[in-house]
Amino acid sequence: MSRALLISFMAMAMLLLFSAAFAQGYDDCKQACAADRDTRNMACPSPYDDPSAGAERRQCIEKNQAAYKECIKQCPAPPPASSGDQLAPPAMGY
């Protein structure tokens, strides 16, 4: 009986560790979205190679920004800010 309890406890612990390892916080997700956007922006046409590519580059960057916003929507919700997280104004030091 104790062996079955130990095995079930270990299985539950492994599942929790497995899910915690793949859990992604809001900040990590936001950074991943930004990195993906920046990578796609580098693939946009360069105005230095072709001066007439300005409009095409602008459209490419706007499309990447829209994809970034969609990516952010897929991120887990950020934790709610508590009143203790707000910074107090600095002391005036009179």
Image: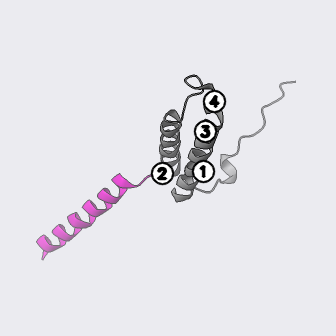
Mark 2 to mark 3: distance in Å?
35 Å
Q: Is residue 86 above or below residue 9?
A: above
Q: Quadrant of residue 5?
A: bottom left
What residue is shown at x 32% (from left), y 61% (from top)? Answer: 16
Q: Amino acid at mark 4?
A: Ser
Residue wearing tag 1: 66
Say what secondary structure mark 2 lies in: loop
- 18 versus 62 height, above or below: below
- Per the rendering, the mark at residue 21 is none
Instruction: Answer left or right for 13 relative to 5.
Output: right
Query: Is there CB contact under 8 Å for labels 2 and 1?
Result: no
> Range of the magenta residues?
1-25
Q: Are marks 2 and 4 in contact (CB under 8 Å)?
A: no
Name the quadrant of the C terminus. top right
Q: Nearer the viewer, mark 2 or mark 4?
A: 4
The CA span between labels 3 and 4 is 8 Å
Of the two numbered discs 2 and 4 on the same chain, state the one appearing first in sequence.
2
Q: Give the residue at the far bottom of this rendering.
A: 1
| Disc assigned to residue 56 | 3
- For mark 2, does the 10 Å Cα neighbourhood hold few (<14), some (14 to 19), or many (20 or more) residues? few
**The magenta stretch spans residue 89:** no
Quickly name the residue at label 2: 25
Sequence order check, earlier mark of 2 and 1: 2
2 vs 3, front mark: 3
Alpha-carbon span between mark 2 and mark 1: 21 Å
Find the distance from the CA under tag 4 to the CA under tag 1.
Answer: 23 Å
Q: Nearer the viewer, mark 4 or mark 1?
A: 4
Dot 3 amino acid type: Glu
